[in-house]
Image (cartoon, grey):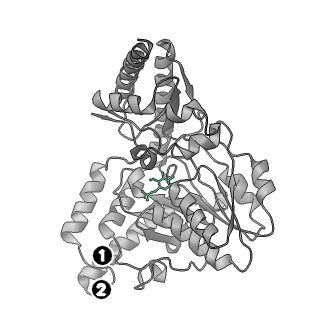
Amino acid sequence: HIYLDNAATTPMAPAVVEAMTNQMQNDFGNASSSHWFGRTAHTELDAARKTIAQSINAKPDDIIFTSGATEANNTAIKTVAHAMASKGKHIITTAIEHPSVLESMKALEREGFNVTYLPVSETGELELADFDAALDDDTILVSVMMGNNEVGSRLPIKAIGERLVDHQALFHTDATQTYGFYYIDVDALHVDFLSTSAHKINGPKGVGFLYRRPGYKLLPFMNGGEQEKKRRAGTENIAGIVGMAKAVSLLTPEVKAKHQADFYGFKQQLLKQLDDAGIDYALNGSLKPDNPNHVLNMWLKGLSTYALQTNLDLAGFAISGGSACTAGSLEPSHVLIAMFGKDSPRIGESIRVSFGTYTTAEEVQAFGVALIKIANRLHARAKK
Ligand code: PLP
């Protein structure tokens, strides 16, 4: 079986498994305990926080460990909206965010906040003019993802951050799909909050973090003990956090540069294969050499997502019909709807392929061969 669904989740790196196993077997203490076991666990927590902070040019104190990006997104969006409610009721986001952002926005709308969902172009990109038109004196929060999980588009985080420097609105970005591939400097981008998750970068599931800009007093989303300086109660998932830090330490600038070159190469290689075989397809998104996103989303004209996905699965290739959340249900992709409208045939005829650390050119080649075979077979069957 060949795994080409790295935007859904990634396999854990062997070094991550090793670090976690060692942590669980030898250093099982509760980081809040004052005895040796507790202190050892606390030391590991501190070391992990330092590694992770450095990865985005932040200070350790500004990293809050969470159960993943869903919790980090919920925390940032809801607690900031509540804290800022006396200054305004308007929030800006995009129509193509992850459900953990969109559903948080809907929850806030039910409480009386007004949310603007910015539209995107047919390549899944944001027009800054739309952002400028939406921003007003009532805006208290802006949440825009760094890169999209279904089509791989890159959003203009730095430009938005710069626009908000002298504005009261706080700026949150969901960096879950880009953290492993982009060079991120929270100061240079002017972001106030950043969310991400370990399981997209060859780390474990159920752990992630929220960055919050220095000095901002984050209201707790989880109430309870005094962990994370009272910003997130609950005994820390130390094995997960240690695993996440190990995964982060593997992502050196050299590795990121290699990923960027590899992913762009894989995308070109696959599309050339399809072109050479005369397959009728179009990209959902765009192919840009400087976008290190690992996602390739394609419309295979006239072929159903379901048929493609199940036939590819039978042939041993794991891809997705959209995001992992939408693939399991029959919900059409809100991202493709935002790009092409709800009546576009692309909605039911597209697949997402996403590469990862362990993807090889041979696997991509084999996938191309299988996809061409399946596409031709399905077309032939449809003609009968
Ligand atoms: N945000 C984006 C863009 C994602 O792709 C995901 C992945 O599922 C999440 C948030 C949620 O992350 P987690 O699974 O850690 O809750």
Q: Which residue is at a point 47% across and 23% down the rendered structure image?
A: 269
Q: Which residue is at a point 32% across and 47% down the rendered structure image?
A: 11
Q: Which residue is mark 2?
A: 33
Quarter of the image for the N terminus: give it.
top left
| Quarter of the figure with residue 315 | top left
Residue 50 picture location, percent across and down: 45, 68
- Residue labelled 1 has its Cβ within 8 Å of some atom of ligand 1: no
Quarter of the image for the C terminus: give it.
top left
- Residue labelled 2 has its Cβ within 8 Å of some atom of ligand 1: no
Q: Which residue is mark 1?
A: 41
* Kind of element beneath mark 1: helix
Q: Residue furthest left?
A: 25
Q: Which residue is at a point 56% across and 78% down the rendered structure image?
A: 218
For the residues labelled 1 and 2, the Cα–Cα distance comes to 9 Å
Q: Is residue 282 above or below residue 357?
A: above
- Mark 1 Cα-neighbour bin, 10 Å: few <14, some 14–19, many ≥20: many
Residue 4 picture location, percent across and down: 38, 36
